[in-house]
Image (tube, rainbow, N blue to C red):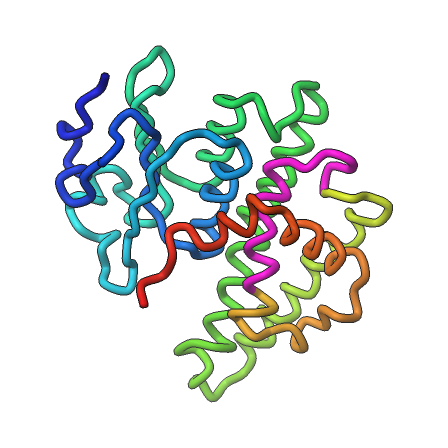
Amino acid sequence: MTDLASFPIASRWPAAHPERLQLYSLNTPNGVKVSIMLEETGLPYEPHLVDIGKNESRTSEFLSLNPNGKIPAILDPDGPGGKPLALFESGAILLYLAEKTGRFLPADAAARWETIQWLMFQMGGIGPMFGQLGYFNKFAGREIEDKRPLQRYVEESKRLLGVLEARLDGREWIMGADYTIADIATLGWVRNLVTFYEARELVGFDALANVPAWLERGLARPAVQRGLSIPSRPS
């Protein structure tokens, strides 16, 4: 068994179960992608709360695993070839876990790449744009007198929701009948947009039909409900 104590991150977040995959995260929209995926697959793991409010993701121990200083990150003691694997970037982690478990990523090459395409749509569009809207609508950016930045991100978020709305027309999930990592990556961001970021009215969410129904289906999944609170924000 791999001795995780040899990894600097384990000195700050010791592993009670070093044989399990270690998750270093917080239940942000990016963080819950991985906790939802782990809950959906049933892969044994041990979550560790990284309090970004206290800049714990910028500590030397965390940076030893992810030099970019962002959650989530994982350390899998049973990586490829039985060797430990440290991995960051939520999209990369989703792809790794899908391959490791053989779930939520189609085996068919064309469908596989189409799924990855929609994962990248979340990574490059929905995540950054929704996050900026949240900053300018709810956080420090709301104090800026010039509202053009807010309006820019409102309009772009509405456009992206329109793309998702069209994609989901006649489909239960982003890839059709099959629930995939594309859904797992996107659910938390859409949920956050209309709840935590308080942008439901700004983006005209209730005028949509397919996206709200998809979100409701996703949130009804028990693994999604569990994953959304792992690791919970500090009180």
**Magenta-highlighted residues:** 174-192
Quick check: 46 left or right of 216?
left
Image point (46%, 34%), residue name = 92
Where residue 188 appears, as percent x and y from the top left, is 55, 54
Q: Nearer the viewer, residue 128 or 174?
A: 174
161 above or below 185? below
Q: Nearer the viewer, residue 77 or 128?
A: 77
- Magenta region's main secondary structure? helix
Q: Nearer the viewer, residue 107 or 102?
A: 102
Q: Nearer the viewer, residue 4 or 133?
A: 4
Q: Which residue is most to the right?
A: 170
Q: Which residue is most to the top?
A: 81
Where residue 96 appears, as percent x and y from the top left, is 47, 27
Where residue 173 appears, as percent x and y from the top left, is 73, 43
- Say if the magenta span includes residue 234: no
Image point (53%, 71%), residue name = 197
